[in-house]
Image (spheres, rainbow, N blue to C red):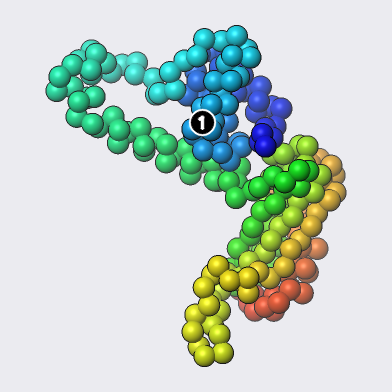
């Protein structure tokens, strides 16, 4: 299934391709789709063909690198293997940015966006509600063709069984419940902070009604 890219982001990606900057196009595609760099590279190469652009090297710009390094002579930067360290540093940075901006945990299933939220019981139910509102807003804005967002709320504390043994976090016992939001067209009209601050209360109340929802005793969010 092809990832859904917002129209404005797709325009930016195409602009990078037309400018011959495939590396930036690949990073942006990965950032906004949640797919890995290899998949993004294949998608950009396909777009290059569709746009009639000449495929460009998907490596960082070497402008300003000394001639000896750029030519790859013996004993140079390339022979030292340092370029591999730099390359993977860039890759890791792209992945981190992708997680922060687009939410790499979001899965698209037809017209539904599915994501997980960890409810840290050291905070308040209100803070968890705001976190859910923010995640729903981001998913709605990032995926304009999606009509439903499903948020699975997972308990962030530690659980033990009747014998006092820790229960693995992979257990379904950590799942508190699921929140479903369908009014995405209305949500998309809000600015990020306004939706989170004005409409987190319904999500907060749902969290409080879930199993272990009464254990959130932290201070209220500002």
Residue at 14% across, 23% down = 75
The residue at which mark 1 appears reads as 27
| Above or below for 218 versus 15 | below
Residue at 58% across, 71% down = 171
Residue 25 pos. (x, y %): 54, 24
| Above or below for 6 versus 19 | below
Residue at 71% across, 57% down = 151
Please indicate whether residue 58 sits to the left or right of residue 134 in the image: left
Crowding near the residue tagged with mark 1, few <14, some 14–19, many ≥20 C-alpha atoms within 10 Å: many
Is residue 163 visible from the viewing direction of this image?
A: yes
Please indicate whether residue 84 sits to the left or right of residue 180 in the image: left
Residue at 74% across, 55% down = 150
User: How many dots with numbers?
Assistant: 1
Is residue 220 visible from the viewing direction of this image?
A: no
Instruction: Using the rendered view, name the quadrant where residue 30 is placed.
Output: top right
Residue 216 pos. (x, y %): 64, 75
Of all residues, the one furthest to the bottom in this rendering is 163
| Above or below for 57 versus 180 | above
Residue 98 pos. (x, y %): 54, 41
| Above or below for 171 versus 78 | below
Seen from the viewer's position, the closer of residues 206 and 190 is 206
Q: Secondary structure at mark 1?
A: helix
Instruction: Using the rendered view, name the quadrant where residue 144 is placed.
Output: top right
Residue 200 pos. (x, y %): 75, 59
Image quarter (top left, top right, bottom left or bottom right) of the N terminus:
top right
Instruction: Using the rendered view, name the quadrant where residue 59 is placed.
Output: top left
Image quarter (top left, top right, bottom left or bottom right) of the C terminus:
bottom right
Seen from the viewer's position, the closer of residues 33 and 139 is 33
Of all residues, the one furthest to the front in this rendering is 1
């Amino acid at each position: 299934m092809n990832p859904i890219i917002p129209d404005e982001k797709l325009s930016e990606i195409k602009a990078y391709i037309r400018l011959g900057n495939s590396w930036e196009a690949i990073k942006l595609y990965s950032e906004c789709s949640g797919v890995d760099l290899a998949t993004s590279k294949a998608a950009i190469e396909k777009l290059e063909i569709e746009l009639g652009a000449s495929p460009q090297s998907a490596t960082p710009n070497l402008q300003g690198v000394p001639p000896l390094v750029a030519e790859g002579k013996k004993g140079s930067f390339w022979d030292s293997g340092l370029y591999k360290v730099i390359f993977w540093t860039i890759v890791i940075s792209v992945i981190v940015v992708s997680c922060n901006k687009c939410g790499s945990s979001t899965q698209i299933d037809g017209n539904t966006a599915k994501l997980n939220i960890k409810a840290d019981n050291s905070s308040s139910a209100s803070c968890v509600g705001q976190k859910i509102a923010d995640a729903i807003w981001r998913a709605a804005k990032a995926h304009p063709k999606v009509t439903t967002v499903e948020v699975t709320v997972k308990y962030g504390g530690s659980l033990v069984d009747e014998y006092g043994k820790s229960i693995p976090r992979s257990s379904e016992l950590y799942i508190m419940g699921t929140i479903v939001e369908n009014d995405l067209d209305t949500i998309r009209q809000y600015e990020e902070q306004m939706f989170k601050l004005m409409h987190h209360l319904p999500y907060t109340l749902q969290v409080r009604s879930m199993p272990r929802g009464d254990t959130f005793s932290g201070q209220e969010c500002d």
